[in-house]
Amino acid sequence: MKVFLGFIPIEKYTGLALTEIIVEQLSAHGLSLENIREQGCDNGSNMKAINQQIQAEQQAAQDYLSMATNFLHPCLSRPGAGGFFMKMYKEELDHMQRLIEYQLIRGGAIIISGLNAPTVNENLTLYCAFKQSLNMEKSVTEMLENIVKVAESVNDYQCADFITSVYLAEQMASINELSHHITNMSKICGDEHAVYHYDQRLLKSYPHPFNFKMPGN
């Protein structure tokens, strides 16, 4: 059911915030702000699943950022790996922002939740970082597939198509790329010289320039 509030006699509510006025009018009809927000979306379960995905993408971005800064630090100095994970960080942010815009366009409420602290430690090897990343991407993919299932269950084919054509296609590419890195790294684990050259190869594909300048320079 769509609800049109019509004209609200503002003079009756002098001194009240606009939100309070709307809440009172909705209450008179047995409704709430949440009812109105959900009317813009085809289904409340879709909205909930997308919000969960927004948080998952935000969490993945933070974890990748932690990996990137870990490898870029002078104590470890793996600039190629740092650039690669910085690229992954930016991709996850882009995924999150597109989901937020999609949710807003559909009239859904955006719920931004707190994140868990990254589990990355300073002794993380490149091989282990790739394995952690693969597990993370698989988990994110499962959540995306769940959105598709929820959308199809309520005949929201537009949402299912959006997630499938945009997100799941990118997930497949990321999982494939990480799988190749894991296979290659498994062959050279323990060989510092080989790992160094592998990182240099990554650096050519994923450079991360430092553009920081001191004031006055």
Image (spheres, grey):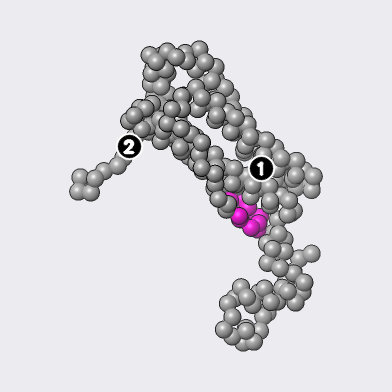
Secondary structure of the residue carrying tag 2 is loop
Q: Which residues are magenta?
A: 100-111
Residue type at the position of mark 2: Phe
The percent position of residue 60, horizontal first and vertical second, equals 54, 39
Quadrant for residue 148, please give it: top right
The percent position of residue 56, horizontal first and vertical second, equals 59, 43
Quadrant for residue 206, please give it: top left
- Can residue 72 be seen from the camera position used here? yes
Q: Say which residue label 1 marks.
A: 162
Residue shown at the point (63%, 52%) measured from the top left: 103
Left or right: where 10 falls relative to 126: right
Residue shown at the point (34%, 34%) measured from the top left: 209
Question: Residue at the left extreme?
Answer: 216
Secondary structure of the residue carrying tag 1 is helix
Instruction: Using the image, tell me which numbered label, if any, was put on residue 210.
Output: 2
Residue type at the position of mark 1: Phe
